[in-house]
Amino acid sequence: MLFLTLLIASLLLIATLFIEYQIYQHTTAERLNNRKRIHSWWGIFVLCLIVFYAGNITLALFVLGLSLWAISEFLRLLKHRISLSHTLLTIALIAAYYLATPYLLTLPRYYSVLLLLLPIILMLLSLIIHPKFTTPLVIITALSSLILIDTFSQQSGLLLLYLISITALNDILQYMTGKLFGKHHFAPTLSPNKTYEGAAGGLLLSSMIGTLTLPFILPINWQIALLIASTLSLCGMLGDLYISYFKRRAQVKHTGNSIPGHGGLLDRIDSLLLTAPLFAVSVLLIQS
C-alpha cells in the first residue's frame, strides 16, 4: 500500500514540477490549464486515499454522491434535470448493492459475474433504448462495482487505489503520447483529439505499468496481470468514447465545468464505467 501511494505521489510531483517549469519558460493558456489539471489530480488522489480506507459505509456514501453528480451531468446533456425519481432510484439501488454484497460471496460465481457485467449490458442497451433511462443505470451499477470490490478482498483499499490509478494513468498517457506523436485521428466524430499514436502509446505504457504492479497486489502471475491490465486499458478508452458519443450529440466538449482543468465529473470517470465492473469480475474470480 505504501509503495503504491508513494509511487503515485512521486508521479504527481514530477508532473507538477514539469508543468511549473513549462510555465516558467513560456506561459500559454494550455499550460495554465494543465496546472489546474494537475492540482485537481492531487485533490482526487487525496480524496480517494481517505475514502478507500475510511470503511465501507463511507465508500457507499461516496459512490452515492458520485452517481448522483454524474447522472445530473448526463441528464443535462439530454436537456433534462435530475428528478426525484432518479434520486430515489439511485439511493435505492446503491443501498441494495451495499446490503447485498455479503451474500454475493455465497452465490454461484456465474450469478455474481453476471451482476458485475450488468453495466456493460446496459451500456449496449443504451445505444438502442432511450439513454435517459439506461445510462443512469450504467453509472449506478458501474460505480457500485467499487462497493463490491470492497467486499471481495481484505486489501480492498489497495485494489481500489490501483483501479483508479491505472484508469487515470491510461487517460494521461494517451493524452501525452497523442500530444507528442499524434498525427492520425481514429475517431474524429466522437473524439476529435484522439489519435492512433496516442491510443497505442497510452495502451502500451499503461498495460506495461499495470502488469508490473498488479502481481504485488493480487496473487497472480505476470501473464494474468498482463491480461487484466491490457483489458483495463482498452476498456478505459471505450468508456471514454461511450460518453464522447453523447457529448457529440449534445455538441459540447465537456459534461460540465465542476473539476478545474478536466471539465465535469463524468469527463473524469467515464473510463470507470467499464474498468470498474471488469476489474471487480477479475478480483472476484481470483479471490474465489
Image: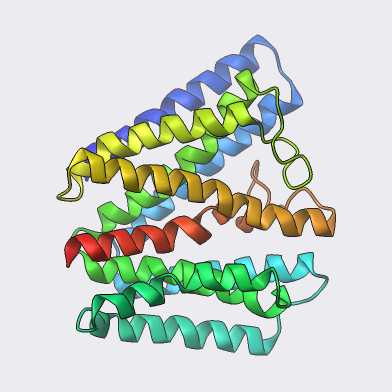
Return the residue found at the far top: 25
The residue located at (37%, 51%) in the rendering is: 163
Q: x, y (%) of residue 111?
A: 32, 80
Q: Is residue 197 above or below residue 194?
A: above
Q: Going by the image, does 26 lie left or right of 219?
A: right
Q: x, y (%) of residue 3?
A: 22, 37
Q: Going by the image, does 196 lie left or right of 232?
A: right
Q: How many marks?
A: 0
Q: Going by the image, does 23 lie left or right of 7?
A: right
Q: Quadrant of residue 156?
A: bottom left
| Quarter containing the N terminus | top left
Return the residue found at the far left: 219
Residue 256 appearing in the image: no
Q: Is residue 56 above or below residue 203?
A: below
| Quarter containing the C terminus | bottom left
- Foreground: 246 or 226? 226
Q: x, y (%) of residue 227?
A: 33, 45
The residue located at (83%, 71%) in the rendering is: 79
- Foreground: 195 or 3? 195
Q: Quadrant of residue 196?
A: top right
The residue located at (71%, 18%) in the rendering is: 27
